[in-house]
Image (cartoon, rainbow, N blue to C red):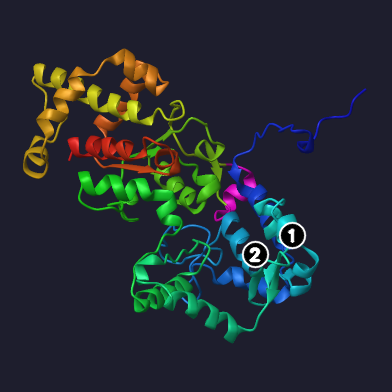
Amino acid sequence: MSSKPTPEDGYIAPYTHPAAGWGALKYVAINLVKEKVAGGKYVTLFRQNQPDGFDCPGCAWPDREHGSTFEFCENGVKAVAAEATSKRVTPEFFAENAVTSLLKQTDYELEQHGRLTHPMVYDAVADRYVAIDWDEAFALIARHLRALDTPDQAAFYTSGRASNEAAFLYQLFVRAYGTNNFPDCSNMCHEATSRGMPVTVGVGKATVVLDDFEHADTILIFGHNAATNHPRMLGELRECARRGTMIVSINPLRERGMERFTSPQHASEMITGSSTKIASMFVQPQLGGDFALIKGMAKRLIEMDDAARERGEPSLIDEYFVRRHTHGYDAFVADLRAENWADIVEQSGTTFEEIDALTGVYARGKNVIACWGMGLTQHKNSVPTIQILTNLMMMRG
């Protein structure tokens, strides 16, 4: 008889528990041990997202009042543990490992070796990195920068794993050098947002602030899994759900974190093993089907508005806002009316009934937030998808 399959065999066991809870705390401990974080450095965790500490490099979720010592999540622990690791990559490591051989390792495997102890420079003849002293490293950088015809020929990339303080000093240096070429992980993740929104709303950043979540009665969440990518958002969504906010998850994959969440910040849930229901509705478009889905919502909203007017009911469209603050609305509506429902359903991967129900949720909401992640921004139709979503939101002011 064969033994029970394991994850190493490609077998994924069913997960029946809520997101977070004791499982998250378990993996906090696992990551601290795996990174070999030395004893005294554990206290670093208690300075995350504190007034006298530092912002977590795990994600960009903002802070309210710091009412808890544990203002961090599993992802934040991973990020800080990677910074505080005692694992080191010395010049001897590179003497034993040619770059060609290192290229065969995955990004994960490379990171597990640890942190550099010296500045290193590539020796093409030996196919190895070799150590140089700091003065020589700075001089090498300076020679290359001075050799450029213009500062704009250089690009200065930084990762979201860098601290706010380090990133601030870095951009001061680069601006003093004479350029603002700062491609970073935000560009990579949300370039579609910063390209799409200026055309529709005039700014390239989100217009919602954290306090808006306290007043929202409807939250539409497109294409991101908070439990995996920014778990602290689940704490905010938990509070919204407990206030009765209608939360809709719009994602091809039905994520457990959007179903049920056990908050490590709340002792009652941890002790009893209970959880909070997050999303009340799930819509699962096919990959890349978001544009058609959202356009279908806009088309259905027009049809619902027509029916409301015929019944003598108030309009579902904020006509005052539209006429005063937008342009091109009539052409936009004409395009929606001309769209074929069969095409929308096929391209979205959903049903008309699902689009109708989702539009009804949006139409009934008085204070609606639409938020999105890389499920919208990381495909070839991302810019028009962001634009159609912002247009949908502006239809109701």
Q: Mark 2 — residue? A: 81
Q: Which mark is residue 34?
A: 1
Outermost residue toward the front in this view: 125
**Which residue is painted at 72% across and 33% down in the image?**
13
Q: In terms of sequence position, does the residue under pointer 2 or pointer 1 come before the other?
A: 1
The amino acid type, in three-letter code, at marker 2 is: Ala
**Which residue is painted at 49% across and 79% down in the image?**
143
Find the magenta span and give its range. 264-274
Query: x and y percent of residue 68 in the render?
Result: 51, 65
User: Toward which corner of the image does residue 117 lie, by quadrant?
Assistant: bottom right
Residue 170 placement, left or right of 87? left
Q: Which mark is residue 185?
A: none
Q: Is residue 98 magenta?
A: no
Residue nearest the viewer, comparing 170 with 32: 170
Residue 301 to residue 36: above or below: above
Residue 161 placement, left or right of 184? right
